[in-house]
Image (tube, rainbow, N blue to C red):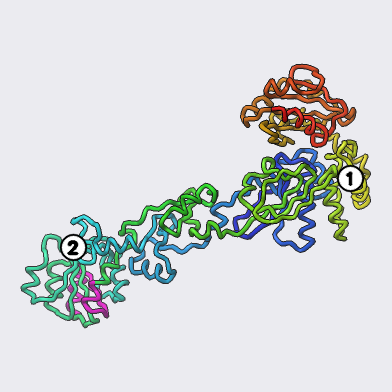
Amino acid sequence: MFTTVNDDDNTPYTYVIGHKNPDTDSIAAAAATAELKKLQGMNNVIAACAGLPLERTEFIFKKFGCPLPELKTDVYPRVKHIMSSEPDYITRGNSLLQAISILQKKREHRLPVVDEKMKYQGMLSLFQLLEELLYISKPDAEAENSLTGRKVRSSISLIKQVLNGSGLSIHKKDVFQDFEVFVAAMNVDSFKEHIPRSDPDSLAIVVGDRAEVHLMAINYGARLIIVTGSRRVDDVIVAAARDKGVSIIKTPFDSATVIRRLKFSSPVEASNLQVADTYMPGDRICDIKRKVLSDHEDIFPVVDDDDILTGTFRKSDIDNRKPIQLILVDHNEFDQAIDGVEEVPVMEIIDHHRFAMPPTPSPLKITCDIVGSTCTLITEMFLNSNIPLSPSIAGVMMGGIITDTLMLKSPTSTIRDKHALEELARITGEDPEKLTEEIFQIGSLINKLHPEDVLTADKKNFHIGNVRASIAQVEEVSFDEFHKKQPELYEAAEKIRIGEGLDFFCLLVTNIVRENSILLIAGRKEITDALPYRKLANNLYDLPGILSRKKQLLPQLNKVFEKF
């Protein structure tokens, strides 16, 4: 069977792809064109199909040992195509000083914060942090948490780290709490009056080598003594501190530096992390582009379903994404193309249908000629380039020509299709007549598939004048299975017509043995009344000698549609 294309690694790819509801010619053309491009030296070329292959198509690919092109349901550029999958981030529990150091090193003004399991917590912004530290637009109650206040929320471990300190006596080092910071810059008696006694477990006293202050703080049961200037602390005092559960940190910094640094010992989560829009890897760029570009921020977090940080991206990445390119085979109208075709560049078209592609911003290579099968054109490309065809690629292209031209019986067939089929038969050693029998003996699609699947297996949309129409086609060896399911097929056709807002929907059922067709129609009455065909029953018409949707049926319907 086929696999699904994985393009998560940001590598630019060229996809060779046929139309939606692909037939054998479309899928075989994609496989053969991708092989040709690789042999011509193009890198990262992938054959893909925009829908599930028919049973007959699977049979042909299996018979010739050729892997089916990979399934790709759309080509919309997504966040995963532009994000950095190894993002810069700050870990919960880091001090603000560490966080600011990371921001400066990465030259960022904000970064995502994650926990130890990489779960996204929010964004740390330099501007928001500056507002908090400078007490800008904050209520009076929060003034103590600013640079001018004495409150610090931290832990002994973070304080020790920020102060480049050594621990002489350490207790409950990882407990986060609020500290009331006091500097012992006055005599002991005055200092005793200055510090509060109601909550000694929050006291952090900054002092030099003043033993009397050390003892006073220990007797009060202060939480922390910070000794500045790497001054010596008497062993008796250290022992007393350990006994009373008072922590002592010795730092090389002076008192002024200690006070400044303490404010940056708070963990990042103690700051008000910025609430920011998050995006997911599968978000389509076209859906988020306007929102991202209107945001005043520049860097955005990407998370998965469990809020695990998987990447980040910038505004500039929106338009600087690595390109996905398309080579369209067996079609050129965007209505028939894979979803998202309008979002990525089309670099080449190989087709044998009418040309109705919208204008393109840059030139592209077009091979569009009057033959019965796209595989005929690709066979000629191999031959003209003197690039040898492998039997497996030659075999699937035989299947493409046989099914698209009904073994050269369709009026779309040309002498070029005949010559291409003969050359492919020579390479594979297969008898085209025998291969035709094998292909069409695979069975009746009408018998095997649900009515809606029959109608969408090979369906093409057209916009002619003011009429929106869709024409499906299926080849059978008799009309027996159709007549058994005619009511269900009509009901499904009407459902599709209404659901897609169509004026006209029809199913062309072609009998490849008798070489004629019948037409099941669901549509506006004024359109169906204008049809030039003999009516067999309600919504059913006889089309003797009609085999080709493109060359015979569509031109006749165009004349009818133009009246409306």
User: Horizontal and vertical percent for residue 486?
Assistant: 75, 21
Please give the residue where the numbered disc 1 appears in the rendered image: 417
Residue at left 63%, top 31%?
A: 500
Towards the viewer: 12 or 57: 12
Which callout, 1 or 2, points at the residue further toward the start of the chain?
A: 2
Query: Identity of the amino acid at label 1?
Result: Asp
User: Secondary structure of the magenta portion, mostly?
Assistant: helix
Residue 348, relative to residue 23: is it above or below?
Answer: below
Q: Could you say whether the residue bearing mark 1 is in a helix, strand or loop?
A: helix
For this view, does 553 lie left or right of residue 123? right
Where's residue 336, x and y in %?
69, 41
Distance CA(mark 1)–CA(mark 2): 92 Å
The residue located at (70%, 59%) in the rendering is: 44
500 left or right, relative to 130: right
Q: Is residue 256 magenta?
A: yes
Residue 513 image position (x, y, % from top left): 89, 30
User: Which image quadrant for residue 506?
Assistant: top right
Label 2, residues with CA under 10 Å away: few <14, some 14-19, many ≥20: some
- SS for callout 2: helix
Tell me where the magenta segment starts and ends, as one range: 235-259
Mark 2 highlights which residue?
201
Residue at image x 48%, y 54%?
A: 302
Q: How many marks?
A: 2
